[in-house]
Amino acid sequence: MQEVMEGLTLTTAEALLEALHCGALVINRDGLILLANEEAADLMKWPIGDLNGRMVPSLYAEGPERDYLNRMIANFEVPRQIEYHVPTRDGGKVPVIISSNLLGRTPPLSHYKLVTLTDISRQKSMQKRLADDYQTISHLSDKVLDQALDLKHYSERLEGMVRERTLELHEANMESIYMLALACESRDQDTGLHIRRIKCFTEELSRELGLSEREIEIYGYSAILHDVGKVMIPDHVLKKPGKLTPAERRVMEMHTAEGERILSDSPFFSIARTIARSHHENWDGSGYPDNVRHEDIPLPARIVRIVDVYDALISRRAYKPAWPKEEALRIILDGGENLFDPIVLRAFETIMGRGGFIAESETPSRLTCATTHA
């Protein structure tokens, strides 16, 4: 290793690996571990001295897992970022995000790779718990709705009971959605006002676009869950006050697909799944995760895209102060032709020309909205 680090001593290389907030290995083209940091050793429950000098595939049991590692090593030049697992010395498995890149583009550095191992076992456990919670809510909602529909056919006398039960169910669904979204947003140091504003802004912009009241309601409560996938993002990335590295940016961008995956298959969450996956797609195709453009981006995601950007600009973040809404409007209009649906952008500009959005109350638990027309 001392030869390929171009002037860095082995002690310096070890210090660099130890400075990383995740497990890290340096391997050669044969898959030999030349250097591991303490976090990698702790993750796999190996003494660091025993880990150095081992072949990566030998850590895995013979069969498909070892074959998969051998194929990755055979394609050494290909950079990777995958969700996989690392085995522990006692026979366990730890789910991780594996990222690997060559140390350099030309020899001798191109003969070596830096492999980072980000432990996502906590996120996996939380994902399962959230998925179970959503599935339970969905199952109960469908069951109670079926009961309410059956009651409607019994007689005129029972119609009032059906309406009351349906209203209670709707309110319970809204409260469940809000509390689940708030639990996820709290990891991002949000008070809950962000998701309430996103709901209000989405409803008002949908109304300006001429959508039906039913569509407005569905888009509004579905927008609450737009960032539910952030529950899967590690804290050191989600809460980082400075600029993200390219690797951290890729991890952050995973929240869109993770949000879609967390939400259940119930039709009740179909629009929420669409928004969660596509609310970072840009009109010109430069967004993520699918790089779709124009009308290929679902309309509810196009609406949430612009209100999410607007709220981010006017809100204080760890890395910036809140901007005046006039400045936020200027920024949105300057970059609008690339990022936003032109029709949605014009509707947004119309609302801002009337004085902009305003919430009826600043209490996070309330979901009612109003618009100023001053």
Image (spheres, grey):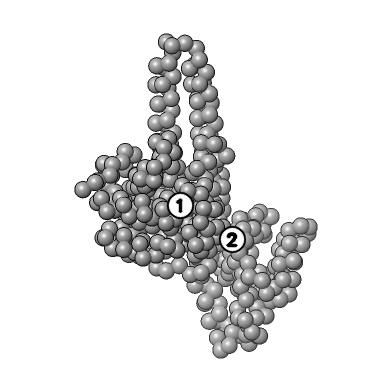
Res. 42 in view: no
Q: Residue at x 36, y 54 (%)?
A: 346
Q: Residue at x 43, y 16 (%)?
A: 159
Res. 198 in view: yes
For this rendering, which residue is in front, 112 or 310? 310
From the top left corner, tell me how far across and down residue 118 is, in percent: 56, 62
Which quarter of the figure has residue 217? top left
From the top left corner, tell me how far across and down residue 48 is, in percent: 61, 69
> Is 314 placed above or below 357 here?
below
Mark 1 — residue? 302
Few, some or many C-alpha atoms within 10 Å of disc 2 (few <14, some 14-19, many ≥20)? some
Q: Residue furthest right?
A: 63
Which quarter of the figure has residue 90? bottom right
Q: Which mark is residue 97?
A: 2
- Classify residue 316 as left or right of residue 306: left
Few, some or many C-alpha atoms within 10 Å of disc 1 (few <14, some 14-19, many ≥20)? many
- Classify residue 103 as left or right of residue 234: right
